[in-house]
Amino acid sequence: DTGVSQDPRHKITKRGQNVTFRCDPISEHNRLYWYRQTLGQGPEFLTYFQNEAQLEKSRLLSDRFSAERPKGSFSTLEIQRTEQGDSAMYLCASRGQASYEQYFGPGTRLTVT
Amino acid sequence: QKEVEQDPGPLSVPEGAIVSLNCTYSNSAFQYFMWYRQYSRKGPELLMYTYSSGNKEDGRFTAQVDKSSKYISLFIRDSQPSDSATYLCAMSLTGGGNKLTFGTGTQLKVEL
């Protein structure tokens, strides 16, 4: 099994621009999670998919954020009209149906200037 | 008050020391407990996973969960400089998607 992969690894964007991140989970993992981590803090839950269905969204996920998992495999996280407060590491994790262990990708580091 | 409290450190120990890392939590419904290791600017790496109370050992690592005290620990024996990283505790409920609630992480430095 290859691990969770994320693309891009780094993104620098100007305030007001839209950005999109991609996550490829471990194959056959049907659950996929997005978290956000700021400096000196632990990751915070954003949203969760079971197959292609988005089952939960955190209050942290404002209307400018949208996530999809169209075929139950890879997922995308889009941020519209980025703000400086969006600067963070965006982490993706996946887990299989039979276990509760979540495996994380390397993250996408977003810097909004 | 945060649901999961973790001393941010930094914690500095000599090589070969036994390291003790701890978290306390307030939600008694948490059932699944994990420890992750995170190197600078990398994603978290799963080290240990425990269900409910008890101990679990894997090589130099031992995880303990005391649900009555709402307290979990990670012990690292014979610590090495390569263990220098941030250690995150995480926990989840049964059901509800099992989203993880993390502590802030403890920064550990193992010195030669």
Image: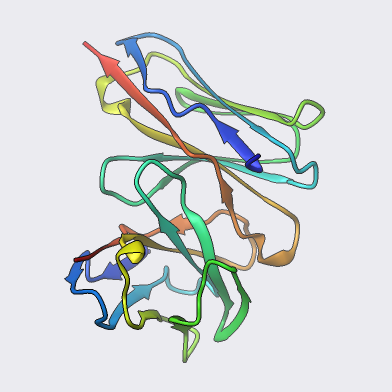
Residue B49 in picture, x, y percent from top left: 58, 42
Picture residue at 34% right of the left edge, 46% below the top: A39
Picture residue at 80% right of the left edge, 41% below the top: B28
Q: By what rule are the colours in the image chosen?
A: rainbow
Residue B24 in picture, x, y percent from top left: 65, 31
Answer whether residue B64 is visible to the viewer in this image. no
Q: Report the residue that reaches farthest toward the bottom.
A: A70
Picture residue at 31% right of the left edge, 57% below the top: A106
Is residue B30 shown above or below A7? above
Picture residue at 32% right of the left edge, 71% below the top: A83
Residue A16 in picture, x, y percent from top left: 26, 80
Q: Is residue A76 left or right of residue B3?
A: left
Residue situated in front as seen by the camera: A102 or B102: B102
Residue B52 in picture, x, y percent from top left: 75, 39
Residue situated in front as seen by the camera: B80 or B70: B70
Q: How many marks?
A: 0
Answer whether residue A55 is visible to the viewer in this image. yes
Q: Quadrant of the C terminus of chain A?
A: bottom left
Q: Quadrant of the N terminus of chain A?
A: bottom left
Residue situated in front as seen by the camera: A86 or B7: A86
